[in-house]
Image (spheres, rainbow, N blue to C red):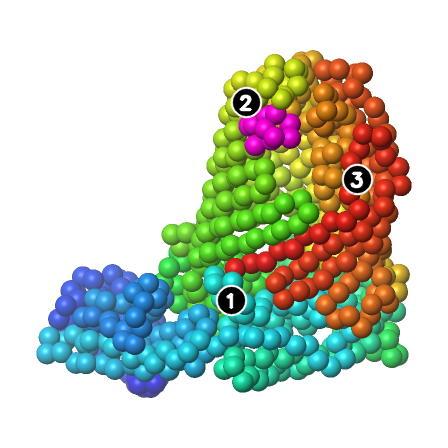
Amino acid sequence: MLKTFFIIFFVFLFTYKSNSEIITGIKVVNNDRISKETILIFSDIEIGKDYSVNDLNKIIQDLYSTNFFSNISLDVTDGILIIDIQENKIIQQITINGIKKNELVEILKEQLLSKDKNPFVENHVRFDVNRIKKILENSGYYFSDVTSKIIENDNSTVELVFDITIGEKAFIRNIQFIGDKYYKDRVLRNIIASEEARFWKFLSKKKYINPELIELDKRLLKNHYLNKGHYHVIVNDSFIEYTDNNDFKLIYNIEAGPKFTVDKASLDLPLDYNEKDFVSIIAKLKDLEGEFYSLRKLNKIAKEVEKLTLRNDYEFLDASFIENIISENKINLIFEIKEFKKEYLTKINIFGNNITEEKVIRDNLAVDEGDPFNKLLLAKSINNLKSLSIFGDVNYELNTVDNNKKILDITIEEKPTGEISAAAGAGTQGSTFGFGIKENNFLGKNIMLDTNIRINEETIRGQFSVTNPNWNYTDKVLSTTIESSVTDRMVDYGYKTNRTGFSFGSAWEQYDNVVFSPSISSYFESLNTNQSATARLKTQEGSYFDTAFSYGIDLDRRNQKYQTSDGFRSRFNQRIPLVSDDFAFLNSYEFTTYNQFSDMVTRISIQGRTVNSLNNEDVRVSKRLFIPSKKLRGFQVGKVGPIDSGDFIGGNHTAVLNASTTLPEFGANLETIDFQIFFDAANVWGVDYNSSLDKSSIRSSAGISVDWFTIIGPLNFSFAQSLSKANTDRTETFRFNIGTTF
């Protein structure tokens, strides 16, 4: 406050003294630790330049922004600029009392703006107190208390002490959804981030009462309802009840309201705009008519406008939806596009990034210094920063300079970006365990490191990957993966493989909703057999080296990735051998479509895969194709298709058809259970080394599937009856899988 008053007083004083003056010399007074040369570098003053009042005011602001000074005054006498400063004291040491875990103390210190041996700034201390409290809340200490204490030393230094009363952890014992929520608890639980505490969840931080996480839950819930057509949805403030066991009950009160359909959607343009430039937007608006209102679809249309703002003709373009309700469940949309006042962004300041490089933040902005100021691109910039998931909060402030110039101040709040995860599952096909360590902002460069291991009945797989989500600031994902796995099928099939290697790939959106993902990989593989292996399999025993180029084309037109109810997805993948003994060439295509009839959602999917050798060799056993378990229920996994000496050997070709539909009215009162009926059909055929073993036959089944959200975790089980099969196939009527995280 004192600094602000001084700057205003200084500007006021200078307006009466002189409009501008040529600086012929510079004098720095009252500096102690900081040399005159350093101060001149900070202020960027040039001898012989004509300085106006605004220029001198900027010098003061630049010097204050270094945090080295508590008071600055300027005076110009006979062309000599006198810089009178008072230096901030230096923090000798930061002490955090009340926390026993050294690891947590180091995490807190890393997140503070105040640092040992750095200038002492009072505003930073106030920020740090709030930051410590937020970090503790994220770790479950909801009732923690933080105070600061400053101890003055004789040598212009201070000791900064934070006293913390940490309190007990606040666990979420129960989560409830009340009100006219329309959807079952099982659906809503899968949307929110918070979760109920269980004794085995020793790694999860989502089991604690956390205000930030609760706000995230509310946003996720509201967006879910808005994307499903519930235009009037109200997610009332959650409230927390204290239970008898000193835990908490988290309650969300939801009023879904009716589902709205779009009756008419139109575009409103200024008279001097060329309608031909907005053809794609008009077409997308037309597609909305007769469909349920969806916030996601509206945002996609807004993105089309963002592309237009990059053109010189539409730099100052603004757009918004005007929504008019015309009946109890119908709405009209007008997409209004207009020009706003022509202004320019002269400067962007970044604050709060102690760990993240400023370049990472700036390169995720859609606006830059000197650009025309555009509200849409500013909103996109802030959303880009939030979507990085490495900041706890992102705020901005716009300041107007003169009539058509703006300064953008962005303040980010960093958060811990490391994660430890563990998960386990069990079912009729065996058990699975996984463990992972992840860092989402390595070296402050927004680079992701991921190490994980996965173990099941047959396979142990370890993997380490490095991912740059915006390589060279091209909006392309670049990733490198090192992997090693052991697959032991000695008992059932008489062989065991060890596979180690790496892959290097990229992915980007080539066209609207079309992602192209090329990669190249190299692997060493050793194959061992025992006496129970087939004669042909024994001939493949040995070591191999493979290098292949792969790519995928993914056209995704689903209305949403989770709980999809409309749209389709089309995927094509190809693996081309470059160095190999068998030169196995793999092709795969899958198409899935979703349709909603009333509250029922149908899903139909087809898939075809084929692998053949380009040099007429036999495809190695580890590359042969099997039907995935989730695509053919009613049969034991891997126990269909060609057989050699009693062993199921897979095939060179597979084809799958899956059809299912939800049953919303069946068990409507069961909040944690959903039902589906399904039909699966598949075939696996082709034996390149012995065509006499190839007995192609359609396998099919029908049944009912149940998804149940239990206290342990999500449980899925199915009852299936085979309708057609080969006489060697092995059937399975009942199947279940249950999983949980820790």
- What is the span of residues highlighted in magenta in the rendered image? 488-497
Tell me the SS state at disc 3.
loop
Element carrying mark 1 = loop
Task: Decide which of tag 2 and tag 1 comes sooner along the chain.
Answer: 1
Report x, y in % for residue 431: 60, 47
Determine which quarter of the picture holds residue 114. Answer: bottom left
Name the amino acid type tagged 3: Thr
Which dot marks residue 731?
3
Amino acid at the residue labelled 2: Asn
In which image quadrant can residue 423 be found? bottom right
Q: Which mark is residue 199?
A: 1
Q: Is residue 65 magenta?
A: no
- Decide if residue 9 is in sight here: yes
Secondary structure beneath label 2: strand
In the image, 690 versus 466, the foreground residue is 690
Determine contact: label 2, label 3, CB under 8 Å: no
x, y (%) of residue 117?
Answer: 21, 66
Q: Which residue is mark 2?
A: 528
Residue at horizontal 55 percent and vertical 84 percent from the top: 243
